[in-house]
Image (cartoon, grey):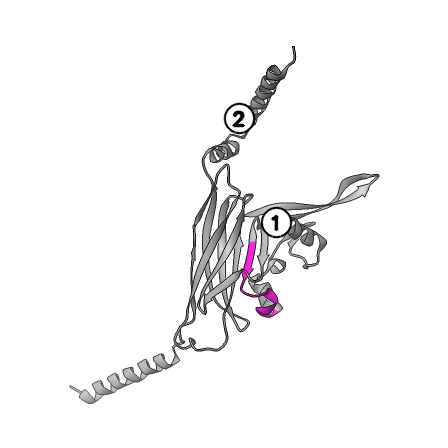
């Protein structure tokens, strides 16, 4: 048996193994997040609630002593819907619709919470690419036969954001994420009483020195329960019967009120 040949093979394997160890990249930071609840139930007396998101940054040994800090951006996007924004003008003393713009498959709910103002997190290109902030979020519109997003100063886009913010469905908080320790953070996501039902995506971004370090995505579900759920299901699945029953109930209520409050 040629021990010299075997020894050479073993030595070569050890050298190659050491080479792989030397060039292997160090493990990067990792995000771990948890939400207070993954299912929001809408009942007849639902007026809104707050979701609490906790997170942890699992740092590797190679970067645990770095001097620069972390930044966190939490974005919550509700189920996509199509909306129409209309512009009204006064004509002969009356307000009439003069123009409209259709927003295609945009979030019905949108909340952006960050540890610092968006302008301090990175370059404008980074903010646009990662859709950080309401102004940088993609809101595609139908303009004639084309579908595209427009500049942030577009009057329809600005009006759409303003209306959604007034309704409590779009929310931005530049200092809404609080660090409990250098690697532990929390934030509170407001969920209004008018929150649409469906699946909500929660995206958490870890940013350091103007660069994206890690990303974590989870989801929650907003559903109707009880009598409201039954009514919504019947209206969706049996539209004609539901409309007929509603009309008959309105007529019966009118006749009953007339009988009870009539004057002899």
> Residue 145, percent across and down?
68, 50
Image vertical order of residue 229 relative to residue 156, above or below: above
Judged left or right of residue 60, residue 231 is right
Task: Please state which of residues 229 and 140 is positioned toward the viewer in this rendering.
Answer: 229
Checking the image for residue 90, the label placed there is none
* Secondary structure of the residue carrying numbered label 1: strand
- The magenta-colored residue range is 111-123
- Calculate the distance from the C-alpha at mark 1 to the C-alpha at mark 2: 31 Å
Image vertical order of residue 174 relative to residue 122, above or below: above
Residue occupied by mark 1:
104
Task: Please state which of residues 101 and 10 is positioned toward the viewer in this rendering.
Answer: 101
> Residue 69, percent across and down?
50, 72
Question: Residue at image x 40%, y 77%?
Answer: 62
Q: Is residue 60 magenta?
A: no
Q: Is residue 112 magenta?
A: yes
* Most distant residue in the top direction: 264
Question: Residue at image x 50%, y 55%?
Answer: 188
């Amino acid at each position: 048996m040629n021990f010299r040949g075997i020894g050479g093979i073993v030595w070569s394997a050890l050298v190659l193994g050491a080479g792989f160890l030397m060039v292997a990249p160090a493990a990067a930071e990792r995000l771990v997040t948890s939400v207070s609840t993954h299912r929001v139930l809408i009942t007849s007396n639902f007026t809104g609630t707050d979701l609490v998101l906790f997170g942890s940054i699992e740092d590797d040994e190679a970067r645990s002593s770095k001097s620069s800090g972390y930044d966190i951006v939490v974005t919550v996007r509700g189920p996509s819907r199509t909306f129409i924004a209309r512009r009204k003008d006064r004509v002969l003393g009356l307000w009439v619709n003069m123009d409209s713009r259709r927003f295609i498959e945009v979030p019905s709910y949108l909340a952006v919470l960050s540890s610092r103002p968006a302008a301090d997190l990175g370059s404008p290109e980074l903010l646009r690419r990662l859709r950080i902030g309401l102004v940088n979020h993609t809101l595609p519109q139908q303009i004639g036969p084309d579908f595209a997003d427009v500049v942030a100063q577009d009057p329809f886009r600005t009006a759409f954001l303003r209306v959604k913010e007034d309704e409590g469905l779009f929310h931005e908080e530049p200092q809404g994420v609080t660090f409990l320790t250098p690697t532990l953070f929390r934030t509170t996501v407001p969920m209004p009483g008018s929150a649409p039902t469906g699946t909500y995506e929660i995206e958490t971004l870890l940013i350091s020195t103007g660069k994206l370090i890690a990303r974590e995505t989870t989801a929650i579900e907003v559903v109707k329960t009880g009598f409201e759920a039954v009514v919504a299901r019947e209206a969706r699945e049996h539209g004609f019967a539901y409309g007929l029953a509603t009309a008959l109930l309105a007529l019966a209520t009118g006749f009953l009120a007339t009988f009870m409050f009539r004057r002899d």
